Amino acid sequence: MEDVTGSKQAYKTAVSEVVGLLGRSTNNASSSKDAFLEELCALRADVSAKYDKSTSVLNSLIQTITEEARANIDLVSKVNVRSETLRSLFSDIERLCEESSQLVNREHVTKLSRASYNISKTVQNTEDIIAIPSLALEAQQLIQEGQESEDAAGVDLVQSYVGIAQLEGASLFARQAVVRQGRAPSEGAASAASDLSSGEGDPRDESVYQDTTLSEYFDKVLVTSAKFETFLWSTVRNFIALGRTHPEQLLSAVKVVEIQEHRDRTDAEDGSGELKQKKRWKARLFEEIEQAIENSTAPLSKLCQMIGESVDTSRQTQTISIDEVLEVANSVAADFTDIYDYSAPCFPKSYDIFSFMMKAYHRGFGKMIDSLGDFSEYLSNRQILSIITWITQYHNFIESLGIDRTAETKEWDYCDLIDIREEQKAKAGGRRKSILSLDAFLRPEGAPEEGKEAEPSNAPEKPGVMGFNSLTQTFMTRMREYLTNWFGNIIEAEDKMMAKPKEDDNGKLWTPALIDLFRILNQQVSIVQKATTGPMLLETARTIIQVMIEFQGIERDRLGAPMDAEAALEAAVAAVNTNLKAYDMSLELAETIETALDESCRGAVDIEEACRGFLQVSKLAVDQVVKCIIEDEGIVQMFARSMFSPDWLTGGATSVLLATLEDYMQDVTRWIEKSFLKRVVESLITNVVDKWISAFISKTPIIQKEVTDQIVRDCSQLRDFFAKYSRDSDHKAFQLMESFSDIVDADDADSFVISYRLLLDVRSDFAPSNLERVLSAREDISKREAANVLSQCEEIFASRKNLLANHSIKAVTSAYRFFKNTKNSAGAKQS
């Protein structure tokens, strides 16, 4: 039963699958039987067609694979056959090689090959030897044509050198062959014996004959080589003209030198250098150039020597002028442009030929300067400046060529001729000087750099250093003498004019001495600046600084010299104005010098520091002006007798004091420069207040209300008086005076102590001992209280530095003064 059920289930499943293939659902299984059968037949037909097609394709593929397999089997068979054939051929080759190795003698083959090479080389060398006379003659004719030709570019030095090199090679080979023949008699002993037996001549005679015959060949080669070298070096020495007209000729000469240098190196590397001597033509090239430059600069030293011979201590006129020497030097230096533009490019960059040439020219010009420096004391200042001017122009001309001044070599690293010491300013960095800069040209060779200790050395000074130093020192010595004489004359004139200074258009007092001094100083700077802006101008600046410092010292001494009161005041005011003008003029001069100085010399001296000395003299002169006023006999007597007397209580003494001060201030205001009037007023306020307080302390009156009222009026009147000349109404001296008046007018002992504490805020050095007379003048304070108050003030004075903070004192000051003013206002209303 279970089997039947399973069969039915399988049937249903099959039907469902078929229906699914037909695109129908199982629900349509009960459809028309005919339609279903038709579809089933169609499906069977389609499956049968696809089966037939697949079978056909599979059969075709199997057939193709079978054919390819058969072809591969045939190919493998053929390869096997060919491999067997190749194996048999290899066996034959090995057998034949073994047979041939027994037939050939390798040693004989090597000897045969070597003999063939030696024969061919011998034939070649023999041909070269035979051709020596004709080649030498051709080379000599070529060189002679070049020497006689006006067109120097007509000679190809490289081609000539190649030919002569071949001659030298052939000659060397022939010489060595003769030498070897003479050194091997044993090899020809048998042939020599047979020659003698046959009646022929002695072989030694034949050797002598060969040597005599070949010597003609060798001599021609030597002569030709010597002529070529002569022509080569004459070409090198003519580097200036050839660089301008025929640079290709100069270039070919340099090429020859380079080729020979290469041959020297090659011969040394392959061992043939033992047979050939190095020519070292590169070193010879530098020697020839150096000699050519020395010849071109030699006339300069000769002219200088002739000038020296014609000069004597009587300073007679020279037979040859300095201008003529410098003109010749200019004509020599004029070649630099052509050298830089045309000649130098013909040399390899590694030669650094332009620097080498410049060094040689520097030596020549340095010898000229040394020769001129030997008799510098017999030259005029104009002639010395002409020489210095030429040196500067020479330096500028080198720079105008557009040379990279930063490209320096250690060989040119000299130090400055004149020691440029750092006085006040320290220069940062310090790049090395250029080889073409003026100071480098004039610096001693091998000297230490600035800031470094000199190491012991026997190196001679660079040519030109001693000469330039002699010229500079001679000129500077004369300048110092000239300035010293003028300085003395100006001081003498100043002493005569001190009694009555001059007034300018605005009524300001001044003396002309410093004006004349700076006129002379500017003149000297201008003269030197036209010649040079280097070390000489720097030395001039140092001399000027010394003159200014000496003049400032004299001005300081004058301010304290005894003099009539009125004259002293005028002299002091004139000193303020004159030194103030001198300060402005010195700054202008300093700017001129600093701007003109070479970069290497700038900052070496602090000219502005010397300039500020005039400003300090003006400040001292202000103190002298105030001293003349405050020490006036009338003012001194006023404080000694009238102040704090019965006349003072009525205001008369104070009025007289202010009237006297007014007279002085009207004169001072008219005479002194406005920029320094404020300084005079401030100093005068301080001195008047100090005098007032000192007079009060020394003559302290009995402190009553009329005394304190007059003190208040004095404070007000002095403040109002000086307000006309100064806007500083809150001057510290007025604060001191008001604080002192607060002490005098203190209500009680405690207020007295507080007022003293506040006074110390204005004048910290006001000692308590100054208050003893004030305390004794207070009738309302007993002696016991006075002693206690003084003790407290001493403690406050001693512990002043331990106060908590400044702002707390100001707060107390403000509060106390507010209370004080309120009390005074109330008292005034009651009265």
Image (cartoon, helix red, strand yellow):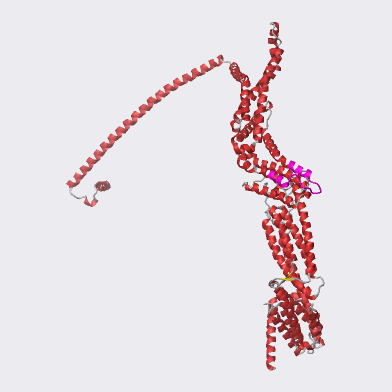
| 655 w.r.t. 82: above or below | below
Picture quarter with the C terminus: bottom right
The residue lying toward the viewer, choosing from 20 and 396, is: 396
Q: Nearer the viewer, residue 484 or 552?
A: 484
Residue 221 part of the magenta-drawn span: no
| x and y percentages locating residue 159 in the rendered image | 59, 29
User: Residue 430: in sight, yes or no?
Assistant: yes
Image x and y of residue 257, in percent: 64, 33
Specify whether residue 315 is painted magenta: yes
Residue 366 is drawn in which quadrant? top right
| Displayed quadrant of residue 590 | bottom right
Image coords of residue 70 (percent x, y): 35, 27
- 591 left or right, relative to 89: right
Q: Residue at x 75, y 65 (%)?
A: 513
Report x, y in % for residue 748.
Answer: 75, 87
- The magenta-colored residue range is 301-329
Q: Nearer the viewer, residue 531 or 820?
A: 531
Q: Decide which of 278, 493 is in the foreground and name it.
A: 493
Q: Is residue 532 visible?
A: no
Q: Is residue 717 above or below residue 181?
A: below
Residue 784 vertical position relative to residue 53 in the rendered view, above or below: below
